Amino acid sequence: MAWLYVIVGGLFETAFAVSLKESHGFTRLWPTLSFAVSVTVSMLLLGLGLRDIPVGTAYAVWTGIGAAGTAIVGMLFFEDPATFLRIAAIGLIVCGVILLNLAGGAAH
């Protein structure tokens, strides 16, 4: 269950990053509220995952999902460039998360 918390928390990290962009400096109500809810849920889920997963591994997975997810959303919906290097960097993030897990980040 701890891994589910961290993974879903990482998805909410993507949501709070996108909401932050859409809030235009907290000047738009609904994206600002979406940001506040998303960041709260994301942190809560990370905290629950940290009960059973080592902090370095959980945080790396959480931020990796958030970073990769935000980059993908940016390329798909915000006209961020989808270059080979950007896509390769996302792949490296995913590989890093997998390697951290294989290196002993399993839940107790």
Image: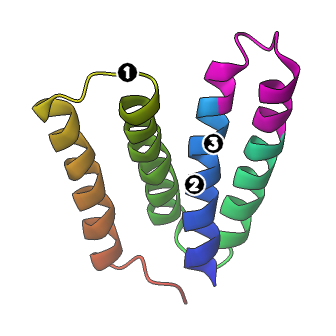
- Specify the quadrant of the image occupied by residue 49: bottom right
At which x and y percent is residue 91?
21, 51
- Marks 3/2 in contact by CB < 8 Å: the verdict is yes
Instruction: Name the element at disc 2.
Output: helix
As drawn, 39 above or below 3: above
Within 10 Å of disc 1 (Cα), the crowding (few <14, some 14-19, many 20+) is few
Q: Nearer the viewer, mark 1 or mark 2?
A: 1
- Residue indicated by mark 3: 15
User: The C terminus lies in which quarter of the figure?
Assistant: bottom right
In this rendered view, identify the residue nearer to me: 77 or 95: 77
* Amino acid at circle 3: Ala
Left or right, residue 11 beside residue 27? left
- Mark 3 and mark 2: span between their CA atoms? 6 Å
At which x and y percent is residue 90?
27, 45
- Mark 1 and mark 2: span between their CA atoms? 20 Å
Within 10 Å of disc 2 (Cα), the crowding (few <14, some 14-19, many 20+) is many
Q: Nearer the viewer, mark 3 or mark 1?
A: 1
- Residue indicated by mark 2: 11
- Marks 1/2 in contact by CB < 8 Å: the verdict is no
- Residue indicated by mark 1: 79
* Amino acid at circle 2: Leu
Instruction: Name the element at disc 1.
Output: loop
Sequence-first tag of 3 and 1: 3
Is residue 71 at least partly visible in the picture? Answer: yes
At which x and y percent is residue 76?
39, 35
Magenta includes 56? no
Q: For the magenta stretch, what is the residue range?
A: 19-36
